[in-house]
Amino acid sequence: MNIFARLFKIGQAETHSAIDQLEDPIKMTEQGLRDLRQDLDKSLHALAEVKAMAIRSRNEAEGFRAKALDYENKAVLLLQRAHKGDLNAAEADRLASEALVKKGENEAHATRAGEDQQKFEASAGQLDQNVQTLKQTISQWDNELKTLKARAAVSSATKTINKQLAQLDSSGTVALLERMKEKVAVEEALAESYGQIAQESKSIDQEIDKALQTSAGGQAAADLQALKQKLGLTGAPDQPQQ
């Protein structure tokens, strides 16, 4: 194989390995969870900003309504002072009119701020729904990832065990055990055989010793009888004197 073909094979293997890694479901799920958490952070930031704008609009509306009420009270006071003669009527009317104009402007601002508040609160409600959906999705994916990792660990262990079991015969383990059993059986039989031989040898020795003991006892009795005859003691025993 020339160098270019070998390089092509190496590149092809690396490509397949990279594809396998890209298709790893655990890694893909982990990456998906990271992306979702980034989306969740962005959504939470946006939700906080929209809620802040709704709060600011509410405060502005309250402030504009307070100013409108204040201008209305000032117009009333101007008219009352003019009625009492404390203030020129024409001047009081002019100033009261200006106060009422300011009142109208502040009421308009209050209305606009109130509308903005409603819009921002509606947007915040929608964003909050999206945030809750993202949280539920992340929680679901977390549980699925844990299950997937557990299944992967079990399948890997099972594959390893099954592979070892499948290779038992090919590795000769079973045949080795059978040979060991046969060898042990032979050794046990030899041990029993030697035991029987030892027992038989012991029995023969006992018989020989017994026979020799009997022969030695008979010779001793014969020798004793001969000695008695020699001494003349073979007759009846003497009677004791009266």
Image: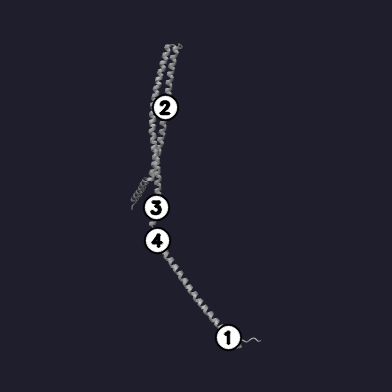
Residue occupied by mark 4: 174
> Can residue 206 be seen?
yes
Circle 1 residue: 225
Q: Which residue is mark 2?
A: 58
Say which of marks 4 and 1 sits in front. Answer: 1
Q: Which of pointers 3 and 2 indicates the residue nearer the eye?
A: 2
Q: Earlier in the sequence, mark 3 or mark 2?
A: 2
Seen as rendered, the residue at the extreme front is 242
Of residues 40 and 223, the one drawn nearer to the viewer in this rendering: 223
Q: CA distance from mark 3 to mark 1?
A: 95 Å
Q: Which amino acid is tagged 1? A: Gln
Assign the C terminus to one quadrant of the image: bottom right
Tell me if label 1 and label 2 are in contact, CB under 8 Å.
no
Tag 3 residue: 158
Three-letter amino acid code at disc 3? Thr
- Could you say which is closer to the camera, residue 112 or residue 65? 65
For marks 4 and 2, give the CA distance. Answer: 84 Å
Crowd rating for badge 2 (residues with CA inside 10 Å; few <14, some 14–19, many 20+): many
The residue positioned 39% from the left and 30% from the top of the image is: 121
Q: Between residues 11 and 237, which one lies in front from this camera angle? A: 237
Q: Position of residue 177 (x, y in %)?
A: 41, 62
In which image quadrant can residue 137 be found? top left
In the depicted structure, whether residue 36 falls above or below residue 214 = above
Q: Earlier in the sequence, mark 1 or mark 2?
A: 2
Circle 4 or circle 2, nearest the eye: 2
